[in-house]
Image (spheres, rainbow, N blue to C red):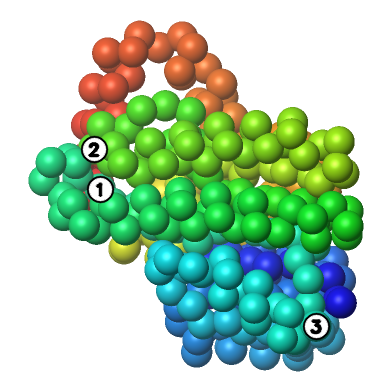
Amino acid sequence: MTPVAIITGASAGIGAELARVFASRGHALVLVARREARLNELAGEIAKAGHPKPLVLALDLAAPGAAARIGEALAANGLEPQFIVNNAGFGLIGRAAGLDRDEQLSMIDLNVRTLTDLSLSFIDSLARNRGGILNVASVAGFMPGPGSAVYYAGKAFVLSLTEALHEELAPRGVRVTCLCPGPVASEFQARAGIIEKTPPWPIGISATHVAEAGYRGLMRGQRVVVPGLAMRLLAMLAPRFVPRGFLLARLEARQLRQR
């Protein structure tokens, strides 16, 4: 069986950049997302650069059984996971009571349930291949998020789960890293309903920078990676030293200004 890196949400943004970074480091890839045409375009680009052409799996990752279908496709192609990169996800801006409830539950299905399923489904293979898991969360995971409550809560779950798995799986030689970027210019903004397409400096950094930092952190066995000095300071200092009520009010005001 050939070891591969599985990258979800690879059709755009951070996921596409992670695919390029992993390919440039010699990893065989499996690209997973709903938009098959986008995945095929990226796979062709990677092959044209002289790397093995990735296997493309066009799947709705929010649907039940996505991890099982990925496993079946891998087995049918003689592949097994060495790295799992859980990047697929989306956010929504607005007060939770005013947003569509089904859409928020779908966000939980993708951002939390599917990520957990993929994190746990292939551990024996990851251990056998001395690989690991890279879960893409957000600086949102370090604090509550009125104005985007369910999204922030989901990212807090991802951060907590990943840190725990980092400890649990270390004896088996499996690296587990949580990548927590701040705002990144991508299609995420349009999906979330954010007007601001390009986050301002110094909090906004490129998807390429985020992907490179995530890859380096995973290979070094880091528990958490927060790219960018401004975001590291925010993640470390704001939840500890800013009064909770003030922080909540400021976060809500900023979130709702972005709609």
Q: CA distance from mark 1 to mark 2?
A: 6 Å
Q: CA distance from mark 1 to mark 3?
A: 42 Å
Query: Residue 249, image x and y in percent?
Result: 24, 22
Give 29 or 26, whichever is nearer the viewer: 29
Using the image, determine if residue 251 lies above or below residue 244.
Answer: below
Q: Residues within 10 Å of mark 3 (few under 14, many from 20)?
A: few
Q: Which mark is residue 93?
A: 1
Name the outermost residue toward the left: 98
Query: Residue 118, image x and y in percent?
Result: 60, 58
Judging from the image, what secondary structure is the residue with disc 3 in?
Answer: loop
The residue drawn where x is 29% and y is 37% is 149
- Quarter-wise, where is residue 228 in the image? top right
Instruction: Identify residue type, mark 3.
Output: Gly
For disc 3, the marked residue is 78
For disc 2, the marked residue is 147
As drawn, is 160 to the left or to the right of 92?
right
The residue drawn where x is 42% and y is 26% is 143
The residue drawn where x is 51% and y is 74% is 33
- Quarter-wise, where is residue 226 in the image? top right
